[in-house]
Image (tube, rainbow, N blue to C red):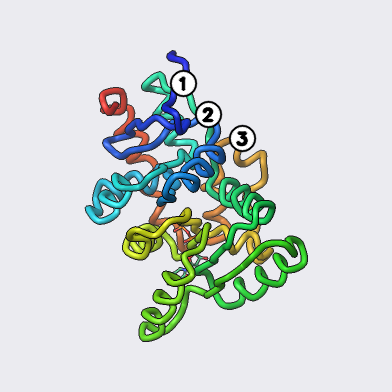
Amino acid sequence: MEALTTGPRDQRRCHVLGVPVDACRDVTAAAIGLHAEAGGQIVTLNAEMTMLARRNADLGAVIRAADLVVPDGAGVVWALARQGIMVQRSPGIELAWSLLKYAEAHGWRVALVGASPEVMERLSDRLAQQSPALQLVFVEHGYQDAGVWPELEARLRRLSPDLVLVALGVPLQEIWIQRMRDRLPGLWMGVGGSFDVWSGLKQRAPGWASRLQIEWLYRLLQDPKRWKRYLALPQFAWSVLRHGERQR
Ligand code: UDP
C-alpha cells in the first residue's frame, strides 16, 4: 500500500473504472482551497454514479471536467483500495454540511436549489433558527415550471454566490451545474437527497448501516422505487474485480 501523497491543493486525481475521483487527506480543506482559487464544481462519486457515467456521455464529461470529485460511496473507496490507494469515505451530505457551517462562520453567500417546495420551506425555517448568521441569498425548490427557470438562472448568475448547493438528482444536478457555473467563482456542488434529510422529512441511514456498508439497503427500504438503480451495484463490483486494478 502506498501512502497518500497529494498536490498543493491536497488532491490527487485517481480513476475508478475510468471515471475520475480525487484522493484527498481532508476533503473540506480541499474544497475551501478550491474556493480560494477560482471556485469550481464538486462532484460526489459513488458506485451507482460511476456506472451511470460510463453509459451517459454527458455525465462522464461533466465528471472529467469537475474540479473536485469526492469518494462518496463505500464501493468507490473499496475500488481505490484495490489499487493500493487508501482514502476515507467522504459522504457528500457531510461535506456539504461542513461547507455550510464554514459559510456561516466566514460570511459566505449561499444559494440552495432543488428538492420539493415542502422540503425547502422546512429547511429554510430550520436554517433560520439553527444558523441565524448564514447568509442565504437564494433559495428555490426544484419543481419549477419550465418557463420560470431562465429568470431564476439569470438571478443566480447575477448573485454569484460563494456556495451553491443543488439537489436535483443525478445526473441532472451535475449537468445543470456545469452549464450554470460557466466562468463564475464559488463552489457548486450537487447534493442529491441532502435537503430532504436536513429538512427532517427523510432519515439518513444510521451509523451501523453505514459501517456494515448497507446504507443503500436502508435507502431502498425508505424508497422502494429506487430498486432499479441498485442493479448497478453488483455490476460495479463485478467490473472492479475484473478490471479495477488496471484502471489507474
Ligand atoms: N428533485 C428536484 N427536481 C426534480 C427531481 C428531483 O428537485 O425534478 C430533487 C428531489 O426532490 C430530491 C433530490 O432532487 O430532493 C434528489 O434526490 P435523490 O435522493 O434522488 O438523489 P440522488 O440519489 O439522485 O443523488
Identity of the residue drawn at 62% across and 41% down:
209
Q: Is residue 189 visible from the viewing direction of this image?
A: no
Q: Is residue 78 above or below residue 149?
A: above
Q: How far across and down, in percent of the image, does residue 6 sit?
A: 43, 25
Which residue is the site of mark 2?
Answer: 25
Instruction: Tell me where residue 145 sits by quadrant.
Output: bottom left
Query: CB of mark 1 within 8 Å of CB of mark 3?
Result: no
In space, the residues marked 1 and 3 are separated at their CA atoms by 23 Å
Q: How far across and down, in percent of the image, does residue 36 sit?
A: 49, 45
Identity of the residue drawn at 46% across and 38% down:
71
Q: Residue type at mark 3: give it.
A: Arg
Instruction: Tell me where residue 215 sits by quadrant.
Output: top right
Q: Is residue 202 above or below residue 120?
A: above
How many neighbours does mark 2 have within 10 angstroms: few (below 14), some (14-19), or many (20 or more)?
A: some
Res. 4 mark = 1
Name the quadrant of the C terminus.
top left
Q: How far across and down, in percent of the image, does residue 227 sit?
A: 44, 56
Q: Residue type at mark 1: give it.
A: Leu
Query: CB of mark 1 within 8 Å of CB of mark 2?
Result: yes
Q: Secondary structure at mark 2?
A: loop
Identity of the residue drawn at 64% across and 49% down:
102
Identity of the residue drawn at 57% across and 51% down:
96
In space, the residues marked 2 and 3 are separated at their CA atoms by 20 Å
Q: Residue type at mark 2: give it.
A: Arg
Q: Which is more N-terminal, label 3 or label 2? A: 2
Q: How far across and down, in percent of the image, does residue 200 sit?
A: 68, 63
